[in-house]
Amino acid sequence: MPLYLRIIAALVLGVAVGALLGEQAGALATPAKLILRLLAALAPPLILFAVIRALVMAELPPGTAPRLAGLLLLNTTVAIFIGLATANLLQPGTWHEVGPTPPEAATQALPGPFEQFIDNIPRSLLGPLTDGGSVISVIILALAFGVALRSLRDRPLRNVRDAIDVGFDTLIVILRWVIEIIPFGIFGIIASIVGTKGFSAFIPLGGFVLAVVIALLLQALWYLTRIRLGSWARPGYILRGTRDALVMAFSTASSTATMPVTYACLRDRVGLRERSASLGALVGANFNNDGTALYEAMAALFIAQVLGMELSLTQQLLVVVTSMAASVGAAGIPEAGLVTMTMVFMAVGLPVEFIAVLFSVDWFLDRCRTTINVMGDINVSALLDGKLRPESTLHEGKLAHAESGA
Ligand code: ASP
């Protein structure tokens, strides 16, 4: 069963069980807390490896790096500002006075030994290896990495690239396991919220979904405007040429899985020059996750609103900077943004437990932001291709000729 169907099933089941159990369902919030702790432990090394990897692997033709970097930085900054402005304007976190707070009952209801065991789940990868680390945490780490590395053990290590790849892929294997158990977390957190707070707790969440979708649409508008002004290909033509990639991004929630399709669409259907298509879609895809950046900034602001916390200007700036870093570190796989979001929350002192509340809508919002992530790559490719239309699109009678109007 695909992940999103399992998540929807978990949602439905969570609502039913929460309504049935009432207050008692509070204790069901525990799995979500565990998942969050695992995600938070994986986030720093994942960002570290993702950024190092992107920098080491990028094959940039001479002279293109500053242009590409400029385009990426501008797009991501615009995305984050659109996100923050929308969240500030719509204030979805204040739509109902009872926010979707995770029930406190969860920890209090835990029996002693169980709680002790849970406490051994590592909070970070290096923590257990330092002075105060517990043996059980070390064993858990050893088990995770041992088993994850089994699937990669025959990989030859010939150079630094291979070493970085193995490090990154090992983390991704472990991350996939954690993602597999997310439906259980969702089931528990939904049951506990419905049981202890009722359905009204979800009103702000509906507002949040709406606000994110509006902000992502605005970002799409920004891309299309930029394309209209800076590329030979018209926005409508680009959208038609790349619709396979966009639909695939929405249906897989993975920009990495979509990458080859994006590249093929840009080169073969739109007719961009090979270099622009590969720079935007293949190189850019590693750094460029504007949808994720926008989402993380909005999530931080939303939870701050729910908690009635005022984020100072410095804190909002911190949100901007960490969201930027987090979006680069977010691997292009489903739910990866949730992992790096833990870093954004920690940077501004927001309680990470609240991310659990977002699990329940993330299966949908992940698809939306992945589509924007891919659209960002398309945008960069189209802009790099410039205003001068490639010869090939003139002579080969491609779709371009009839439709671009250039
Ligand atoms: N799923 C997104 C992507 O593949 C990453 C994220 O979770 O934000 O681009």
Image (tube, rainbow, N blue to C red):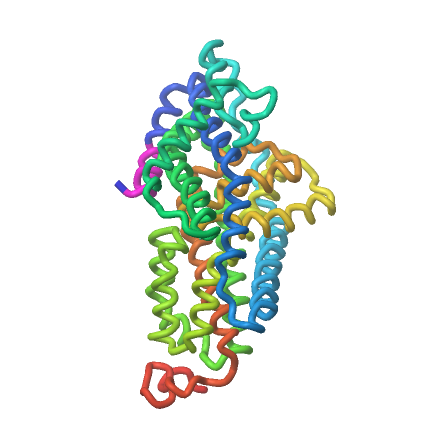
Task: Single out the residue that lies furthest toward the front.
Answer: 158
- The residue shown at (59%, 52%) is 324
Q: In the figure, residue 104 lies in which quadrant?
A: top right
Which quarter of the rendering shows the C terminus? bottom left
Report whether 4 appears left or right of 32.
Answer: left
Q: Is residue 38 above or below residue 224?
A: above
Which image quadrant for residue 245?
A: bottom left
Give 347 or 194, whichever is nearer the viewer: 347
How far across and how far down the image is residue 152, in percent?
A: 35, 41
Q: Is residue 167 above or below residue 236?
A: above
Is residue 268 inside the magenta stretch? no
Q: Residue furthest left?
A: 1
- Residue segment shown in magenta: 2-12
Looking at the picture, how far across and down is residue 250, in whole percent?
37, 55
Q: Nearer the viewer, residue 195 or 51?
A: 51
Give the x, y percent position of residue 85. Answer: 63, 54
Q: Is-magenta flag for residue 4?
A: yes
